[in-house]
């Protein structure tokens, strides 16, 4: 019976390409972790500059949903509800948040989402 999974793929890659693969993966992981630590300090400094409570900011439902689902589209309804609660008009929230979400994507997938979004606005 053939085993598949992360360990099998890793063992095959390390066995055929040598220790250099593991070293490059380790470097990438360390750089990524270092970047995450720096971003935490940058966000914290920015929030302190704006005199915003840091823990209260990150405990918002939209941020936790986006973080744990790793999906912007999954947190969109929650983000729209949050900004409406903060006093943004419904028209602005329903236009600006999806537009901002779709404008950060690239490729054909994004083109189809823009097309769908414009259809919803123009009621074509």
Image: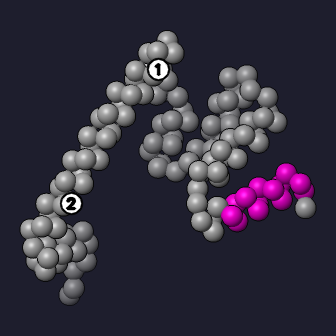
Main SS, magenta residues: helix
- Residue assigned mark 1: 47
In percent of width and height, residue 91 lies at 82, 36
In percent of width and height, residue 10 lies at 19, 70
Occupied quadrant, residue 23 = bottom left
Q: Is residue 1 visible?
A: yes
Answer above or below: position of 8 versus 62.
below
Residue at image position (74%, 36%) is: 93
| Tag 2 secondary structure | helix
Answer whether labels 1 and 2 touch (C-beta < 8 Å): no
Residue at image position (44%, 44%) is: 68
In percent of width and height, residue 107 lies at 59, 65
In percent of width and height, residue 64 lies at 48, 36
Tell me, yes or no, whether the highlighted magenta stretch contains residue 3.
no
The residue lying furthest to the bottom in this view is 1
How busy is the neighbourhood of tag 2: few (under 14 within 10 Å), some, or many (20 plus)? few
How busy is the neighbourhood of tag 1: few (under 14 within 10 Å), some, or many (20 plus)? some
Occupied quadrant, residue 37 = top left
**Left or right: 123 with respect to 86?**
right
| Tag 1 secondary structure | helix
Answer above or below: position of 17 versus 121.
below
What residue span does the magenta drawing correspond to? 111-123
**Left or right: 8 with respect to 39?**
left
Q: How far separated are the C-alphas under marks 1 and 2?
A: 33 Å
Residue at image position (16%, 67%) is: 21
Residue at image position (67%, 29%) is: 83
Residue closest to the eye, 61 or 44: 44
Q: Which quadrant is home to the N terminus?
A: bottom left
Q: Which mark is residue 25?
A: 2
What is the count of numbered marks?
2
Occupied quadrant, residue 92 = top right
């Amino acid at each position: 019976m053939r085993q598949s999974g992360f360990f099998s793929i890793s063992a095959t890659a390390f066995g055929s390409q040598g220790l250099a693969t593991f070293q490059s993966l380790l470097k990438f992981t360390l750089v990524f972790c270092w970047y995450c630590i720096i971003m935490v300090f940058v966000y914290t400094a920015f929030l302190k500059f704006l005199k915003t409570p840091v823990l209260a900011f990150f405990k918002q439902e939209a941020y936790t949903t986006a973080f744990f689902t790793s999906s912007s589209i999954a947190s969109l309804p929650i983000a729209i509800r949050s900004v409406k609660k903060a006093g943004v008009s419904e028209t602005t929230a329903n236009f600006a948040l999806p537009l901002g979400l779709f404008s950060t994507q690239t490729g054909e997938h994004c083109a189809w989402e823009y097309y769908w979004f414009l259809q919803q606005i123009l009621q074509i």
